[in-house]
Image: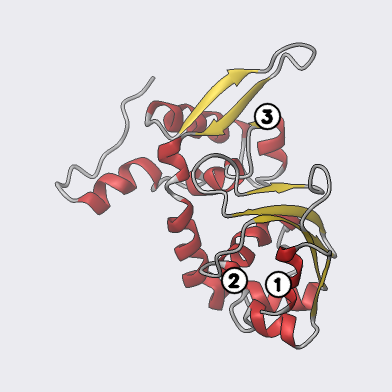
Amino acid sequence: MSPRRSYDQYCSVARALDAVGDRWTLLIVRELLAGPRRYTDLHADLPGVSTDVLASRLKDMERDGLTTRRRLPPPGAAYVYEVTGRGRQLLPVLQALGEWGAPALGERRPTDAVRAHWFALPLLRGLEGEGFEGVVEVRLDEGEFHLRLGAGDDGPVYADGPAPGEPDARLSLDGGTCERVAGGTLPLRDALRAGRAGVTGDSPLAKALREM
């Protein structure tokens, strides 16, 4: 295994970039925050990355303590990658980067790939600080994913697909509204108040979301 490249600067920012500054690394973390993923799943949800680069990044991230690899028990018997506690600490970093980059989103380009769960981080940001706890299933034109509000450090904060079991609330947004929320031009609270996003469910969380 080749030695890790370094900026060789005694600076915490430089040390951080030694570990996560390579192309694709933070996007791999974004995917693994949704829970354990197989290599083929990661490759499918990172359009544009080559198999060689993805394999190299995963090796570097495992060496740097950001991810681990384990074999699923039969009948799965496949290897999955998952983020470590140190890797999970990058969640606020990704949220800050997402907020900073939101004004650059603009209109979706014909060449832009999109996955429903890529909208999880801006929606989590829109619900932060409210003290909500529970599972919210989110339905978009592009598909479904679910959020775990108040999850803390003990597991995935979001995941692709419908929620396992009955969610505490269901949140629905059309494509245009979701793009505006992700782009920072429409706060989620305002979208809910204006009826551009809908909430269903009878739980205290669903009621709290409707009253945002």
In terms of image quadrants, where is residue 22?
top left
Please give the name of the residue rendered at 45% of the width and 28% of the height, measured from the top-left corner.
62
Asked if residue 108 shows in the view, the reply is no
Per the image, the residue denoted by label 1 is 209
Where residue 118 sits in the image (x, y, percent)? 66, 57
Q: CA distance from mark 2 to mark 3?
A: 29 Å
Q: CA distance from mark 2 to mark 1?
A: 11 Å
Please give the name of the residue rendered at 84% of the width and 64% of the height, measured from the top-left corner.
201
User: Looking at the picture, which amino acid does disc 1 mark?
Assistant: Leu
Q: The C terminus lies in which quarter of the figure?
A: bottom right
User: Looking at the picture, which amino acid does disc 2 mark?
Assistant: Gly
In the picture, measured across the screen, residue 31 lies left or right of residue 15, that is: right
Q: Nearer the viewer, residue 76 or 25?
A: 76
Q: Nearer the viewer, mark 2 or mark 3?
A: 2
Per the image, the residue denoted by label 3 is 38
How many residues crowd mark 3 within 10 Å: few (<14), some (14–19), many (20+)?
Answer: some
